[in-house]
Image (cartoon, grey):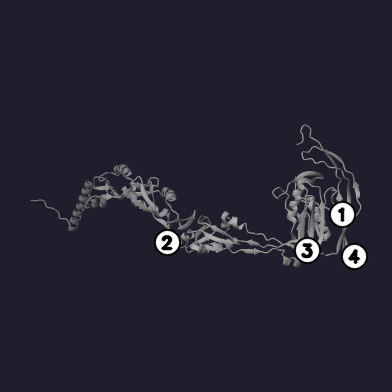
Amino acid sequence: MRPRIASLPPVALAGGALTVGIGGLYLAGLLLTGGEIEAGTTVRGVDIGGLTREEATRKLERHLAAAAPRKLAVQVGDRKGVVDPRQAGFSFDVRETLDRVASTGADPVGVIGGLFRPGGGDIEPVVRIDERKARTALGELAETLDEEVRDGAVSFAGGRVEQTAPRTGYALDVDAAIGSLRVPFLRGAADSVTVLPARESRPKVTAEEVRRAVREFARPAMSAPVTLTAGGRRFTLPPAVLGEYLTMRPDDAGRLTAKLDSRGLRAAPTVAGVLNGLPTTPRNARLGLEGDRVVVAAEARPGMEVTDKALGKAVLPLLTRSGTARTGEVDTRQIQPEITRESAARLGLTEKMSSYTVDFEPAAYRTTNIGRAVDLINGSLVMPDETWSFNRTVGERTRANGFVDGIMIFDDQYVKAPGGGVSAVATTVFNAMFFAGVEPVEYGAHSFYIERYPEGREATVAWGSLDLRFTNDSGKAIYLQAESTDTSLTVTFLGTKKYDEITSVKGPRTNLRQPAKKVSTAEKCVPQTPLEGFDVTVERVFHDNGREVKREPFRTHYTPRDEITCEEAPGKPRP
């Protein structure tokens, strides 16, 4: 009798069959995979199938490091360069790569799934980027590959036209460039050039505009000289001179426009040599006397001024012309003199108001210094209520201003200094002013009395400390006429008399003081004779219609003039 087999429910059988089937597949999967990495898996051609994770790590680190590109050729705009991936922070991330290809160990789904895949296949390695290093490397690259935009330009050199081609500007976009290098690094594209993303700047002045400017202006401008006439004088400007002061500048729309440096051209030797010869300063009519009546001894002459603007206005239109049309006239502005034959009477310059002469001992330095001061004073015109200044008119008494060393008083004694003798001119002007009856504003006598001058009616000047000034309160203009010889000088005031006559009354010397005796060993010592000091008052008396109308006192204090004897310093002979 055969043993009896207990029957199982259908569901149980099915479940048992399912359990046995899955278990078999799981066991088969484990046997087939043989490790963590699925068979047939490669990373960039490196076979890691069937290896453990540790084995695959070592193998990939060795092979991927060797396979990584050592340089990447890049381009920004028209410029090419090279990026070192290692310095830029590019590398292969082996760990992350294995995370993508490794199986899940004993997980039934992963193991069994491997039975139905046709091998792991080739996997691209994961690229890791150190963004800090990448930004630094690409920032340094931008310094060499970035290109500034350049406008087209037209310039002139030596009478020739020079053209500058426009150029598009490129600025590397560092943020975008980091991502754009990932694929070239992954593929090891060392020989191919990667165009990096960059911000583009277009030139405002185009090549077409450069060609137009050259055709329409630049070449015609340099084609031939320009000839100008100013104030009756003719001069020629060759292309080399014109080009030195000529430029073409773009306007807001990028159109090149010609610009002429008129001031620079006006100062150029070719131009200045001619225009500076024009009578730019007007010359007043020179007045003289016939008896006491004022006459015109020499006619006035207007001045001519050629402005920078007028020069530029004359030159620019001629530059695009040809032949005889490149000739033009420069507008000149006439500057009228203050005193002309017609204006003299209107200004009140009709008669002699006063005149005074000072005589002096002949000396070369006096002749030079007095003559120079007289030249500067002669022809001075003082309008009503205007103040005249000796220092402002004559200027500083220096060699550069035409003065030489002479004898003058400094610190109560005679010394040698530039401008010595000019006090004679100051005294003469003072007396002419005194007898013309105009108002003194500033004056000062010498520290001690000088015998050739009238007591209390003389003046001296010192640059920066003492001036001789008067205000014209006559109601009409005053003309100063000055002239000199080797032994005398005369100053005459021409205008309209306000009073019939002006006289001088001198009082007695008072407060007498005796001089001292001194010995000087100074190198520039000047011997000095003694003279007592004193005070004196001179009155200016005004007469009108035959009677005295007022008096003005002029008080002067003179110090004693010490006797000075010059001797050699011990051990040092005087020059």
Q: Name the residue under label 3.
A: 294
Q: How far apart are marks 1 and 4 (CA)?
A: 24 Å
User: What amino acid is labelled 1 in the image?
Assistant: Arg
User: What amino acid is labelled 4 in the image?
Assistant: Arg
Label 4 vs label 3, nearer the camera: 3
Q: What element carries label 2?
A: helix
User: What amino acid is labelled 2 in the image?
Assistant: Glu
Q: What element carries label 1?
A: strand
Q: Distance between the residues labelled 3 and 1?
A: 34 Å
Q: What element carries label 3?
A: strand
Q: How far apart are marks 2 and 4 (CA)?
A: 92 Å
In primary-sequence order, the first of circles 4 and 3 is 3
- Label 3 crowding class (10 Å Cα cut-off): few <14, some 14-19, many 20+? some
Q: Mark 2 points at which residue?
A: 208
Q: Mark 4 points at which residue?
A: 547
Percent from the top left, x then y, of residue 395?
A: 72, 53
Label 2 vs label 4, nearer the camera: 4
In primary-sequence order, the first of circles 1 and 4 is 4
Q: Name the residue under label 1.
A: 555
Q: Is mark 4 on a helix, strand or loop?
A: strand
Is residue 435 something that shows in the picture? yes
Q: Which of the 4 image quarters holds residue 382?
A: bottom right
